[in-house]
Image (spheres, coloured by chain):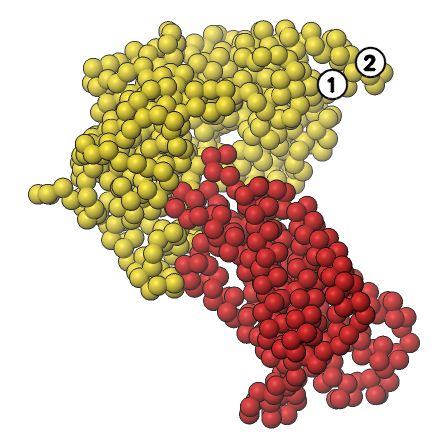
């Protein structure tokens, strides 16, 4: 057992925990914007899958990772655009629409995979880019500053999201549209435009989240490779009480537990692997139940806005 | 003021005229060729029953509805208003009946919302706060720019709404039933602010049901009935009762006669009752009240001071943490709602759309909601549809519910008719105790008169009635005794002949009834 708690193992768990937080962060921060403006998007996982495929396919064929990244963002944004049209213009029920977009992304990514690739291929994903100086710090440097560029991006996104939501006029509009769209509308704020913006932004970030898996973390594309990660991201927004820092805390908790169970399997600790895999999910439910009474969702969450009704 | 500037620095609106406004909704003409005008330095009342088209007309002016026909002239020049932004830019502001405030934001954030910032895409809340304090000073509206809306009283929230409009340069303010939510003291303060604004050259449009307020504060009054313009008159040239008749189109009685009824035994007793709010904080503290047969006990207070919790504690919907509730000497403190119902307690809930009926059910289904499971409406588990239909038809007739048929969905009726359905269901079973929460809120003069008559009829029949109301005129007109609640405590119980608005208002604000 001594081996389990050695410094190497602990550093290993923390390092991969930081890395694994990446897709959760992109997806959940994106979802935070949407939910703060009153739109629940359950299609995150579908957006991620299509984004992951687009990134992988473009990177695989052009051998340019940045083009892959761009493709993922565009695909995610287009999925967001669709979701925005359905929920904002057509006033469709958000939960059901989101599930529809999830199933679309799931099916479409599988179809495209079979048509365009056929077999599991690999790409050389984003390499580890150590941050100058900082990466030299013992332990900390190894854990935080010897990661790929998408990991840094994900963590930078947290303060940026916080800043936008709390310090800008845009953030003020987003928050008010999510709490009281009638009030925002009466002051000339376009509820539709704000929601379009946040949903498309959320889609773009979900696409990035998918790309971070297919061309930075795993460097393959497989059918349903997210296995519900996008839904966890939605849960993380609730866990994080609709705040960027809270989402960060949730993403870290989740990815650390995930990282730990991976290491437990690697180290052959005698726990059935199914149980180990379940751990993060069980944890999510427990944490959500424990925190649910403390937080209050944006008042207009899931409510379509229609002037004059 | 030498030129056409207001103290806020914005341009005055000398005249605003709406001509021939027609607005249709599917199946109804909400406004039919309505003319309306307002000038700088006047308060112009817009009066009419529910559904007369007042709000529609004002929403057209504020750009929330686009009219099918009609023109708007500002200082003689024709303007087009297609959205709230347009009307704000023209110097028109609207204080909505339900405040348009984001509760989780601060005063300054609410004011800044939607406006360009001096710091580009960053918010400039410090500057906004400065200007708020400036405006507050000019107009005598004390407010803390950093306070969150949910921390403010209703009266303070209204000030935020006014500041929001002034900040945007409003020279004309539409006030949609602004006094409905205020205590008498707050109304007085509000009128002082209104008078100041008018003296400074603002134009104010005042929508209200309350005739005495219109007589008190307004210069002219325009009356609408069924979407049509009835006319415009100068207040000084009309009396209150003329105004009422003019609005309703028939004679209405403004006074309520309480017949002499012998007060009977105590039917509902609250004995040192306490309970918690939804958030787990104390909502009722040690409340003791008796309600006797043949009396109406009025429960006055500003909304949100424990009235809803009290009603729910009595009806078994909310657990009582301390004390006892007795119904005809039987301890029903921990009874389920159904058991309380069986003991012939009827309840007209405050939120009739939410708690009083099921919108998507027909009138007949709603009519038997409470007793659908017992004879004559059900036998051995089967609904007796014929009995239900007969009962509903007779109720529709007796209570004069305006509806195409008994199968009409309750949700499609007007507020007054919905209340009649609830009233019919609760009264027709001849309850021993009747708990009526805000029974006439949102109803017009005609419907209010009817509901009041029904409550007085019940009183005559010896029912013990507790009537919760925020409307002091109503409480004072109908109650034998008036209990005042503030922050979950009973401040005192005043007999009818000792009650004055001033005295009750002070108690509503938290002063004890003892002198």
Give the quarter of the figure containing the N terminus of chain B.
top left
Task: Tell which of B356 and B9 is nearer to you.
Answer: B9
Secondary structure, mark 2, is strand
Q: Where residue B485 sits in the image (x, y, percent)?
A: 48, 34
Give the quarter of the figure containing the C terminus of chain B.
top left
Q: Where residue A116 sits in the image (x, y, percent)?
A: 74, 65
Looking at the rendered structure, which numbered label has been put on residue B379? 2
Looking at the rendered structure, which numbered label has been put on residue B372? 1
Q: Give the number of marks.
A: 2
10 Å crowding of disc 2: few (<14), some (14-19), many (20+): few
Quick one: which chain is red?
A: A
Residue at x-position 78% and y-position 88%: A6
Residue at x-position 61% and y-position 21%: B410
Q: Is residue B401 left or right of residue B51?
A: right
Q: Quadrant of residue B155?
A: top left
Q: Let me know if residue B281 appears in the view.
A: no
Q: Where residue A3 sits in the image (x, y, percent)?
A: 83, 88
Label 1 and label 2: CA atoms lie apart by 10 Å
Looking at the rendered structure, which numbered label has been put on residue A239? none
Against B405, residue A163 (above or below) is below
Q: Mark 1 belongs to which subunit?
A: B
For chain B, the rendered hue is: yellow
């Amino acid at each position: 057992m001594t081996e389990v708690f050695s410094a190497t193992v602990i550093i290993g768990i923390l390092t991969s925990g930081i890395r694994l937080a990446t897709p959760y962060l992109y997806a959940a921060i994106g979802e935070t914007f949407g939910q703060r403006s009153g739109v629940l998007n359950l299609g995150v996982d579908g957006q991620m899958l299509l984004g992951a495929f687009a990134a992988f396919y473009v990177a695989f064929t052009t051998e340019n990772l940045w083009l892959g990244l761009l493709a993922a963002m565009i695909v995610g944004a287009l999925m967001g655009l669709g979701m925005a049209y359905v929920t904002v213009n057509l006033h469709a029920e958000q939960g059901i629409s989101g599930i529809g977009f999830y199933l679309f992304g799931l099916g479409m990514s599988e179809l495209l995979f079979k048509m365009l690739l056929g077999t599991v291929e690999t790409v050389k994903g984003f390499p580890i880019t150590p941050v100058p100086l900082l990466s030299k710090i013992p332990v900390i440097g190894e854990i935080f500053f010897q990661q790929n560029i998408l990991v840094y991006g994900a963590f930078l996104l947290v303060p940026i999201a916080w800043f936008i939501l709390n310090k800008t006029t845009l953030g003020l509009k987003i928050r008010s549209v999510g709490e009281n769209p009638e009030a925002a509308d009466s002051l000339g704020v376009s509820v539709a435009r704000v929601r379009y913006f946040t949903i498309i932004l959320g889609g773009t970030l979900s696409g990035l989240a998918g790309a971070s898996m297919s061309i930075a973390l795993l460097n393959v594309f497989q059918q349903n490779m997210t296995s519900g990660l996008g839904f966890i991201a939605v849960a993380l927004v609730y866990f994080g009480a609709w705040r960027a820092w809270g989402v960060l805390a949730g993403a870290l908790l989740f990815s650390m537990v995930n990282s730990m169970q991976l290491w437990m399997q690697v180290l052959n600790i005698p726990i059935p692997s199914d149980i180990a895999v379940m751990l993060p999910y069980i944890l999510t439910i427990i944490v959500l139940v424990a925190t649910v009474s403390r937080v209050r969702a944006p008042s207009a969450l899931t409510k379509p806005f229609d002037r004059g009704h | 003021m030498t030129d056409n500037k207001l103290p806020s620095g914005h341009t005055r609106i000398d005249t605003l005229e709406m001509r021939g406004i027609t607005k249709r909704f599917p199946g109804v003409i909400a406004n039919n060729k309505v003319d309306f005008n307002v000038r700088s330095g006047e308060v112009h009342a817009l009066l009419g029953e529910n559904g007369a088209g007042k709000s529609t007309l004002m929403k057209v002016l504020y750009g929330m509805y686009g009219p099918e026909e009609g023109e708007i002239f500002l200082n003689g020049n024709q303007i087009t208003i297609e959205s709230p932004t347009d009307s704000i830019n023209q110097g028109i502001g609207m204080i909505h009946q339900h405040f348009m405030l984001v509760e989780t934001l601060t005063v300054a954030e609410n004011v800044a919302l939607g406006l360009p910032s001096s710091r580009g895409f960053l918010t400039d809340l410090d500057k906004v706060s400065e200007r708020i304090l400036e405006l507050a000073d000019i107009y005598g509206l004390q407010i803390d720019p950093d306070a969150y809306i949910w921390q403010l009283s209703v009266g303070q929230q209204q000030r935020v709404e006014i500041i929001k409009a002034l900040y945007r340069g409003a020279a004309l303010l539409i006030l949609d039933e602004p006094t409905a939510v205020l205590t008498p003291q707050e109304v007085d303060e509000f009128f002082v602010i209104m008078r100041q604004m008018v003296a400074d050259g603002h134009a104010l449009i005042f929508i209200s049901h309350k005739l005495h307020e219109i007589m008190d504060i307004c210069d002219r009054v325009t009356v609408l009935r069924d979407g049509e313009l009835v006319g415009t008159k100068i207040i000084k040239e009309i009396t209150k009762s003329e105004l009422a008749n003019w609005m309703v189109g028939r004679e209405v009685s403004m006074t309520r006669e309480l017949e002499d009824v012998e007060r009977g035994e105590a039917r509902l007793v609250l004995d040192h009752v306490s309970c918690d709010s939804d958030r787990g904080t104390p909502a009722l503290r040690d409340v003791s009240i008796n309600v006797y047969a043949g009396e109406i006990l009025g429960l006055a207070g500003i909304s949100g001071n424990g009235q809803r919790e009290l009603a729910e504690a009595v009806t078994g919907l909310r657990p009582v943490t301390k004390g006892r509730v007795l119904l005809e000497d039987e301890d029903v403190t921990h009874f389920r709602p159904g058991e309380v119902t069986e003991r012939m307690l009827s309840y007209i809930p405050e939120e009739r759309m939410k708690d009083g009926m099921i919108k998507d059910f027909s009138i007949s289904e709603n009519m038997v909601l409470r007793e659908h499971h017992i004879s004559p409406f059900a036998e051995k588990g089967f609904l007796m549809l014929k009995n239900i239909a007969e009962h509903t038809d007779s109720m529709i007739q007796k209570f004069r519910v305006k509806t195409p048929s008994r199968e009409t969905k309750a949700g499609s009726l007007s507020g007054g008719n919905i209340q009649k359905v609830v009233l019919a269901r609760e009264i027709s079973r001849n309850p021993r105790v009747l708990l009526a929460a805000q029974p006439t809120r949102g109803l017009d003069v005609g419907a209010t008169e009817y509901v009041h008559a029904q409550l007085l009829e019940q009183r005559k029949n010896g029912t013990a009635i507790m009537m919760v109301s925020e409307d002091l005129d109503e409480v004072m007109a109908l109650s034998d005794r008036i209990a005042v609640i503030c922050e979950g405590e009973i401040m005192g119980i005043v007999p009818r002949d000792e009650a004055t608005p001033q005295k009750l208002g002070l108690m509503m604000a938290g002063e004890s009834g003892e002198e």
